[in-house]
Amino acid sequence: METPEQLKEEGLSLFQRGDYKQALATFESAAQAYAAQNDDAGRAEMLNNIGVIHRLQRNSMPAIEALSEAEAIFARLADNNRRAQALSNLADLQATGGNQEEAARCYSEAAALFARTNDPMKQSQVLRAMSLMRLRQGQWLEAMMRMEESLTVRPRLGPGRWLFRGLLRFALGLLVGR
């Protein structure tokens, strides 16, 4: 009989190969195995993975249920980094499902949690995703502000990103009088 950790690794391998159906079944088995060991953190991590697969397969309701449960467990455990990851996945799902305001709430909360856990790269990625969502909505000013914020918190900027951030700051200064 495989351990929860072995099931997790097998599920990740299947996921990386694109075998989502088998990965989903394996993550579900891992979640049950973690639950049997009273390992809430492990179970929540598997729920997050399950939610991601459902999102990729466009199964919105099971994805929302799994990701919301994972986020709630991580909140109860005060595991803010993994809670932020679950919120970010939930935000991506909400954004593609047409619920932009809920997506924005989840992106904002995830960015704040990543900032608190000193994970600027993930914070930057979440802010960038929120910026792109706002851009698709035609909310240019907020999109520019979130992108500038994303580039500001990013740990290392190459010359192209440094220049882009400078241009954004200049444009924002003209638009909002910064």
Image (cartoon, grey):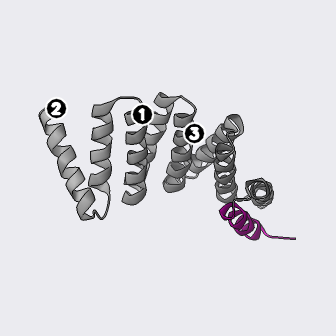
Can you say whether 160 is above or below 48 in the image?
below
Name the residue nearer the viewer: 102 or 73: 102
**Main secondary structure along the magenta-highlighted residues:** helix
Q: Sequence-wise, which precedes: disc 2 or disc 3? A: 3
Q: Classify the position of the C terminus by image quarter.
A: top left
Mark 3 packing: few (<14 Cα in 10 Å), some, or many (20+)? many
Q: Which label is found at residue 93? A: 3
Q: Position of residue 138 (x, y in %)?
A: 36, 29
Q: Image check: 120 left or right of 2?
A: left
What whole-number distance in Å separates the C-alpha atoms at marks 1 and 2? 21 Å
Helix, strand or loop for disc 3: helix
Q: Where is residue 100 in the image (x, y as percent from the top left)?
A: 48, 30
Name the residue type under label 1. Answer: Arg
Foreground mark, 1 or 3, reads: 1
Please tell me in which quadrant of the rendered image residue 140 appears.
top left
Residue drawn at the location 39% of the way across and 34% of the way down: 134
User: Is residue 87 magenta-colored?
Assistant: no
Q: Sequence-wise, which precedes: disc 1 or disc 2? A: 1
Whether residue 92 is visible: yes
Q: Image check: 108 left or right of 7?
A: left
Helix, strand or loop for disc 1: helix
Mark 2 packing: few (<14 Cα in 10 Å), some, or many (20+)? few
Helix, strand or loop for disc 2: helix
Residue drawn at the location 16% of the way across and 32% of the way down: 175
Q: Position of residue 51 (x, y in %)?
A: 66, 46
User: Magenta residues?
Assistant: 1-17
Q: Mark 2 points at which residue?
A: 176
Please tell me in which quadrant of the rendered image residue 98 appears.
top right
Name the residue type under label 2. Answer: Val
Residue drawn at the location 32% of the way across and 50% of the way down: 150
Q: Which label is found at residue 136? A: 1
